[in-house]
Amino acid sequence: MTELNLTPSRTGSRILGFGSYQPERRVTNDELAQEMDTNDEWIRSRVGVIERRLSEPGQTLVDLAVEAGKNAVTDSGLTPSEIDTVIVATCTMETNIPNAAAQTAHRIGIQAAAAFDLNAACAGFSYGLGTASDFVRVGSAKNVLVIGVDKFTNWVDYTDRSTAIIFGDGAGAAVVGPSDTPQIGPAAWGSAGDLAEMIYVKDRNSFIFQEGQSVFRWATTKIAPIALEAVKRAGVDIADIDVLVPHQANLRIIEAIGKGLRKHGARTDLKVATDIQYSGNTSAASIPMAIDHMRAAGEIKSGELALLVGFGAGLSYGAQVVVCP
Ligand SMILES: CC(C)(COP(=O)(O)OP(=O)(O)OC[C@H]1O[C@@H](n2cnc3c(N)ncnc32)[C@H](O)[C@@H]1OP(=O)(O)O)[C@@H](O)C(=O)NCCC(=O)NCCS
């Protein structure tokens, strides 16, 4: 039988840099309360959001992706010409044709990149990062730009108080490249398609619907064990983890995941991302954006171990341990 060539594989992969971007327009809870029957106290105590950023009219999802992508490339120290693959994780494009990744690559100045979109909703960045890491390790790519971006203003009914208060727009990105020592652990990822009806958009003329309480129960019971599985697969101990960066869905869900991990030995000084307070739930953007904000604030140091865990519509979930650049 004919044997075909394989690309030479590599020992490991690592994150070379992070970047993020948020629209300028800040929308407070009080502003939403002028449009619908809600109030600041309810939103802060039930969801944890103080304000979110919403896109300006005419600002597209690709506009957000481009800015975050540029920032991550700059942070990585590479030039756009050194990137050969662009993955955009998103579930909220204005239209699906063409994809976001090819346009984003072109506008950043990345020539002829392999470019594709990936939809795992709010778990999208975890899937994108796992895919990028594996591409680099098997030699399918050298340097991959992974962007998590969502623009829920495309899909939220701003008269529906059960969803409008939660979501924000934004983009977060990372550049993944080769490493002599593995710096991105294996992904613990999976799905529960039997629960698909918990979060959905019925058709292209509809808005997002979610069974809030069911999603809340699922996230507060199922996600900590998935995060622990990622720790096991990475071959480290939960007590080695310095930073927990869960998808920023709801502050009470984030706290429940932190509590679940502490029961299994996570340190009391474990730093936990709470970016939701000033960003809202930005879906696939929330994990890289939270890390980027924490690095900018000096809350994460180079070499620290971060545990990332994404979850959302599908239902889909994915987690991995990474060494912070
Ligand atoms: C949506 C969510 C915030 C609702 O919070 P909750 O504590 O479950 O609230 P409930 O749906 O039980 O509603 C409680 C009451 O608040 C009311 N309420 C709902 N939204 C409200 C709002 N924005 N402002 C004020 N009151 C509100 C309800 O009508 C209900 O009133 P009632 O008791 O008189 O019937 C919460 O369930 C949640 O965050 N779920 C997870 C969703 C999520 O993370 N989705 C993304 C996954 S990636």
Image: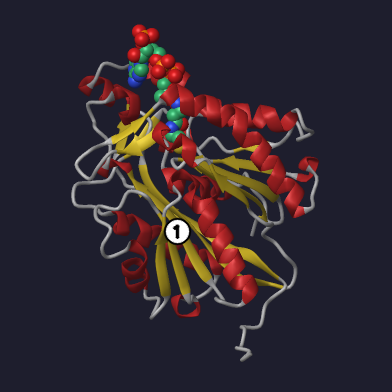
Q: Residue 250 in the image: state x and y as whole percent.
A: 48, 30
Q: Is residue 190 visible?
A: yes
Q: Quadrant of ligand 1?
A: top left
- Whether residue 24 sits left or right of residue 252 in the image: it is left
Rendered position, 84 above or below 164: below
The answer to which image quadrant residue 242 occupies is top right
User: Which element carries disc 1, helix, strand or loop?
Assistant: strand
Kindly identify the amino acid type of the residue bearing the numbered disc 1. Ile
Label 1 Cα neighbours within 10 Å, binned few <14 / some 14-19 / many ≥20: many
Question: Image point 49% across, 75% down: which residue?
Answer: 83
Question: Image point 61% across, 33% down: which residue?
Answer: 222
Placement of the N terminus among the 4 image quadrants: bottom right
Question: Image point 32% across, 63% down: which residue?
Answer: 99
Q: Residue 137 in the image: state x and y as whole percent.
A: 64, 71
Q: Residue furthest bottom?
A: 2
Placement of the C terminus among the 4 image quadrants: bottom right
Q: Residue furthest front?
A: 1
Q: Nearer the viewer, residue 61 or 279?
A: 61
- Whether residue 125 sits left or right of residue 205 in the image: it is right
Q: Residue 131 in the image: state x and y as whole percent.
A: 55, 62
Rendered position, 182 above or below 266: below
Residue position marked by numbered label 1 in the rendering? 147
Q: Nearer the viewer, residue 67 or 116?
A: 116
Q: Nearer the viewer, residue 70 or 316?
A: 316
